[in-house]
């Protein structure tokens, strides 16, 4: 039979396959939501990447999972909206732009606010283009007609609306509080923008002299520079050692200020001396004690971490230089009597790395208690947000139930400017979406809002809210699933939920699929300092996007971290190459078959019946596992079906009819090859979109693109359990013969005698029917099949379900070696017998498991017992 000429190259080259394909999809508008009312909507919003830099492997993983879901749903007939967009990322972007300006010898202050913002928009434009190029390289099916940016006009309107409404509802307030301050970027940080690291520090033990009597009171601190702002010493009201001193005064060393000794339940009598110095402007706990006792708040630092005029002679010194000098001065005056080394947890800015300073500042806050309560209550309703895996719901609830008020103002220029104005003369505050009418008498707040304030609105602000009549908002909100890493449950997931409930009275998404972090091969977090980061674009250049995507999506189960290993990506490339070669063979042997010529009704071989049944089972398993977000399991089923069954067995067996003379058999085989390959490419498409589109375009097909093709469905006409059983027996026989040949170094090209002792006449008939396969793949000089064959004395043997094989290989086998081999095989079947019998003797399993599962285990027990007995009998024969 002649092969047809094929335009598919002989070698799989991912860069050639992937080139220009994405533009074809985008030009065809295959990814755009249609608004078709006949279809059910399915919505995902992309977690917007920051415009600070290029995407990393975590982004590639996260977006690949979303792409799989949206491609599957599109193929299942949903009106899919996967909405793309990016985040302005306040602190991070401003820091990058300022660093660039510094290299150019200027600063934001030299430029002024407007010119600086122009530079920031230029940065955004450049990096947004990098990100889009990377989305393209990954093959993401995004609807660019709806792309959004957190600082664009519509989203800015939503942010103003939310701020004003929360303020009117007394859920936003302005106040003086201790906040986390980053002296490097000179801005407030929320609690979750602070990373705690263990640092070698010290406890500095000091004695403060008493005012009206002899002696002193002992206190300790880890930050001696803040003592300059002490306004009290606190003791426990029940501490007998200090009861007589409550209400009296101590003298603050160096400064000489009189400070009160107060009683407060917060103090732990058993820790240290039982007396605590109180610095209300530099410690959150001291701030609360200060409020209870009406203490003065003395700030001793500037915003850049240098000491201010309240620090006396230390004014102008950096906080850490000041610490050294104060320690020396206190030692000299005998106030500091002990320095105790101590490892303690110190907050660092997530963005700049600077040591965070607890700092008294006037900021804007969200009153979280009522908002958090609504979000927690939602989880007890039918409309709850489903966390996958569900263990992360506890993480979320624990955070929400213990949440503190959220500091939302940032001392930056890049971001949503706070919609609040202060009257130049009266100091009155005006909050509104627009400036007050007599604008010249008012000054707008200089600060901007925390980035997370705007990204918390992402699922609905991107759909046109606050215009609730917007068609997209009405059709596509709430969204179906959010895919994100466990590291931003607090930052982002929780905030989207409470803002959505407050402003739309609905959950923002039905499911939250949580994945882990991408780590290196040794399990370490990828970081610049370790130099172990991997650029996804480098992986794509080497192995293609399909290989990277398949590795990322199938390399771990939900909620787990993923270890990046180059050799695993290479093995997925090998998988893609196997698919390419098998598809080329199939296509070359399909003749000129057209889509309408595919006919699966003709007489089918056992291999045909088997592959169609296994295709059905694979469709069922892949669909079920994708619905459960178990992409690794879906990928495993696909891999096994494609590599082991379709490529290694069916294609080999198809060669017999394809190279034969029976035209009807040739047409049926071509039809099955075309049908199975088509259905397989559809299933694999969401994982490997490029190679599957390329192969599908060469197949006989309906429609313009595989992206629009319908998702495979189980076809009940193609379900033949008998064929599966027969095929498994054939495969077991062929494998056993190949293994025995390898053991005695007899190549497949050399004919050998093969005897198959069947359990009954039914199996004899079945094997006779499939004699052509046994002759083709076992290459026997003589093939005997029966129920009463005599086992030759010197023969290798193997046991398969329902039959025993004998290969008389006189002169090639050593009886002792064969007995040893059989002993190993006996141990294998004995282990299986014990395992299955243990399971069946477990009353809980037998009672709770579905009947068909128990029945399956009983069938296995009989099979294993039979195999063990046959091996045992063969050993006895050889030992006789």
Image: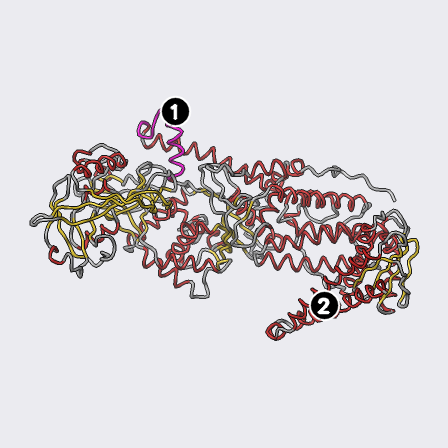
Looking at the picture, how far across and down is residue 619, in whole percent? 67, 57
> Callout 2: helix, strand or loop?
helix
Residue at the left extreme of this rendering:
212
Residue 826: tell me if it is visible.
Answer: yes
Tell me the magenta residue range. 91-110
Coloration mode: secondary structure
Q: How many marks?
A: 2
What x and y, as percent, mark residue 675? 75, 53
Q: Is residue 361 visible?
A: no
Instruction: Give the main secondary structure, helix, strand or loop, of the magenta stretch.
Output: helix
Residue under circle 2?
860
Q: Is residue 563 left or right of residue 414?
A: right
Image mark for residue 104: 1
What residue is drawn where x is 66% and y is 69%?
A: 853
Q: Which is in the foreground here, disc 1 or disc 2?
A: 2
Task: Name the residue at the top extreme.
Answer: 105
Q: Quadrant of the C terminus?
A: bottom right
Say whether residue 685 is left or right of residue 234: right
Q: Give the image location of residue 51, x and y in percent.
A: 45, 38
Secondary element at tag 1: loop
> Which quarter of the picture shows residue 578?
top right
- In 3D space, how far apart are the residues under numbered discs 1 and 2 (Cα atoms)? 75 Å
Q: Where 466 sits versus 438, above or below?
A: below
């Amino acid at each position: 039979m002649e092969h047809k000429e094929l335009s598919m190259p002989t070698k799989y080259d991912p860069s050639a396959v992937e080139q220009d394909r994405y533009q074809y999809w985008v030009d065809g508008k295959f990814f755009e939501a249609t608004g078709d009312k006949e279809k059910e909507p399915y919505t995902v919003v992309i977690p917007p990447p920051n415009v600070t830099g290029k995407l990393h492997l975590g982004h590639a993983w996260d977006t690949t999972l979303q792409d799989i879901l949206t491609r599957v749903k599109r193929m299942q007939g949903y009106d899919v909206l996967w909405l793309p967009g990016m985040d302005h990322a306040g602190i991070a972007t401003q820091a990058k732009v300022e660093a660039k300006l510094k290299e150019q010898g200027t600063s934001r202050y030299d430029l002024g606010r407007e010119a600086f913002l122009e530079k920031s928009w230029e940065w955004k434009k450049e990096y947004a283009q990098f990100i889009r190029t990377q989305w393209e390289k990954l093959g993401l099916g995004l609807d660019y007609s709806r792309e959004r940016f957190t600082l664009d006009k519509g989203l800015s309107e939503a942010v103003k609306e939310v701020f004003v409404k929360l303020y009117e509802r007394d859920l936003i307030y302005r106040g003086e509080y201790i906040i986390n301050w980053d002296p490097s970027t000179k801005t407030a940080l929320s609690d979750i923008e602070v990373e705690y690291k263990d640092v070698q520090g010290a406890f500095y033990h000091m004695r403060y002299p008493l005012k009206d009597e002899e002696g002193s009171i002992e206190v300790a601190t880890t930050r001696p520079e803040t003592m300059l702002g002490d306004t009290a010493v606190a003791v426990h009201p029940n501490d007998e050692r200090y009861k007589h001193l409550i209400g009296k005064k101590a003298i603050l060393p160096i400064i000489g200020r009189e400070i009160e000794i107060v009683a407060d339940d917060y103090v732990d009598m058993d820790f240290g001396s039982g007396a605590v110095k109180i610095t209300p402007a530099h410690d959150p706990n001291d701030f609360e004690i200060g409020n209870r006792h009406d203490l003065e708040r003395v700030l001793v630092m500037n915003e850049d971490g240098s000491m201010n005029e309240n620090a006396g002679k230390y004014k102008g010194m950096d906080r850490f230089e000041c610490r050294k000098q104060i320690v020396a001065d206190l030692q000299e005056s005998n106030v500091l009597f002990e320095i105790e080394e101590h490892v303690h947890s110190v907050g660092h800015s997530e963005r700049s790395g600077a040591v965070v300073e607890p700092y008294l500042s006037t900021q804007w806050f969200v009153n979280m208690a009522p908002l958090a309560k609504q979000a927690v209550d939602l989880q007890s309703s039918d409309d709850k947000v489903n966390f996958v895996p569900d263990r992360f719901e506890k993480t979320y609830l624990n955070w929400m139930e213990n949440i503190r008020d959220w500091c939302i103002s940032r001392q930056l220029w890049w971001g949503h400017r706070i919609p609040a104005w202060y009257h130049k003369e009266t100091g009155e505050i005006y909050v509104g979406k627009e400036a007050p009418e007599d604008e010249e008498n008012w000054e707008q707040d200089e600060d901007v809002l925390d980035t997370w304030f705007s990204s918390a609105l992402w699922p609905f602000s991107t759909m046109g809210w606050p215009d609730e009549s917007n068609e997209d908002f009405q059709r596509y909100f709430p969204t179906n699933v959010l895919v994100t890493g466990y590291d931003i449950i607090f930052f982002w997931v929780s905030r989207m939920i409470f803002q959505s409930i407050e402003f739309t009275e609905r959950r923002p998404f039905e499911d939250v699929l949580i994945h882990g972090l991408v780590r290196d091969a040794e399990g370490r977090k990828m970081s610049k300092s370790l130099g172990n980061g991997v650029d996804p674009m480098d992986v794509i250049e080497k192995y293609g996007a399909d290989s990277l995507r398949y590795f990322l999506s199938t390399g771990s189960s939900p909620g787990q971290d993923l270890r990046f290993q180059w050799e695993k990506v290479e093995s997925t490339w090998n998988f893609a190459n196997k698919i390419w070669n098998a598809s080329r063979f199939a296509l070359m042997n399909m003749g000129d078959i057209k889509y309408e010529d595919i006919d699966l009704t003709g007489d089918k071989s056992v291999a045909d019946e088997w592959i169609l049944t296994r295709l059905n089972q694979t469709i069922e398993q892949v669909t079920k596992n994708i619905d459960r977000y178990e992409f690794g399991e879906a990928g495993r089923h696909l891999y096994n079906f494609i590599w082991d069954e379709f490529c290694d067995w069916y294609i080999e067996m198809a060669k017999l009819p394809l190279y034969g003379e029976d035209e009807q058999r040739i047409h049926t085989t071509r039809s099955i090859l075309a049908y199975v390959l088509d259905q397989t490419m559809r299933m694999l498409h969401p994982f490997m979109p490029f190679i599957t589109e390329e192969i599908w375009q060469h197949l006989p097909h309906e429609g313009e693109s595989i992206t629009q093709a319908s998702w495979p469905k189980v076809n009940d006409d193609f379900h033949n359990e008998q064929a599966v059983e027969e095929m498994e027996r054939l495969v077991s026989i062929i494998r056993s013969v190949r293994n025995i040949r390898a053991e005695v170094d007899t190549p497949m090209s050399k004919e050998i005698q093969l005897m198959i002792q069947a359990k009954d006449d039914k199996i004899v008939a079945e094997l006779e029917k499939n004699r052509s396969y046994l002759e083709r793949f076992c290459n026997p000089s003589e093939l005997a099949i029966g129920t009463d064959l005599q086992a030759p004395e010197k023969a290798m043997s193997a046991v398969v379900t329902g039959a025993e094989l004998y290969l008389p290989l006189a002169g090639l086998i050593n009886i002792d070696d064969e007995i040893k081999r059989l002993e190993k095989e006996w141990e294998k079947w004995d282990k299986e017998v014990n395992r299955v019998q243990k399971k069946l003797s477990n009353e809980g399993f037998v009672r709770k498991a579905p009947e068909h599962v128990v029945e399956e285990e009983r069938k296995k027990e009989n099979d294993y017992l039979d195999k063990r007995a046959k091996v045992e009998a063969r050993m006895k024969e050889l030992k006789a």
